[in-house]
Image: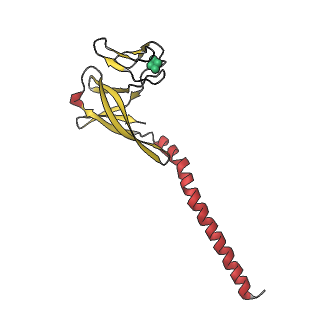
Amino acid sequence: MGQEDLSRRQFLNVAVNAIGALITAVVAVPVAGYFIDPVLRNKSGAGNWVKLAPLGELGADPKEFQFSTVRSEGFMKQEVSAKAYAYVDGDKAKAFSNICTHLGCPAGWDGSKQKFFCPCHGGVYDKSGKNVAGPPPRPLPPYETKIEDGYVYIQIV
Ligand code: FES
């Protein structure tokens, strides 16, 4: 085995190791990002603020608003649309989802009875979204709200 063979062997070893390291990095970086991204997102506690409506469109009774947002799961992003009910309470805006906490049917506001009714199993919620009758175990899911530049925003987490 001559000096030339040894250097060829060393070169091949370095080349094989470099290619192996490159393949490992190509696979490992996205996988690590997939697992780390949700942890970092949750740690910040910051959700996605969505513009719901001009403050002037909200009244004393809950009103239905449609909104869309981008939901992220790992690297997957998907635009989803949903509904929120919102009303003005003093100098604040209150908002919550209309998804019933029993089995997920959409509850609707009945202004004449000042209650939300779920059509599936008779769940009833009061104006603030609190469960008051029927099988729902919890209030309608609330949204954090903020008012900025005359618009109401809700926080999607
Ligand atoms: S899903 Fe609303 S009461 Fe059952």
Against 36, residue 50 (above or below) is: above
In the image, 38: left or right of 9? left
Q: Position of residue 70 (x, y in %)?
A: 39, 42
**Residue drawn at x 37%, y 33% as measured from the top left:** 82
Numbered disc total:
0
- What is the image's colouring? secondary structure
Asked which quadrant contains residue 107, the reply is top left
Q: Position of residue 42 (x, y in %)?
A: 48, 41
Of all residues shown, which one is farthest toward the right? 1
Residue 11 is drawn in which quadrant?
bottom right
Q: Is residue 33 left or right of residue 50?
A: right
Q: Residue furthest front?
A: 120
Q: Position of residue 118 (x, y in %)?
A: 40, 18
Indicate whether 131 appears above or below 4: above
- Which quarter of the rendered picture does the C terminus lie within? top left
- Locate ligand 1 by image quadrant: top left
Image position of 128 (left or right of 148): right
Quadrant of the frame with the N terminus:
bottom right
Q: Nearer the viewer, residue 96 or 40?
A: 96
- Residue most extreme to the left: 56
Q: Residue at x 35, y 20 (%)?
A: 108
Percent from the top left, x then y, of residue 49?
Answer: 35, 39
Q: Is residue 123 above or below residue 53?
A: above
| Residue occupying image coordinates x 23% and y 38% | 149
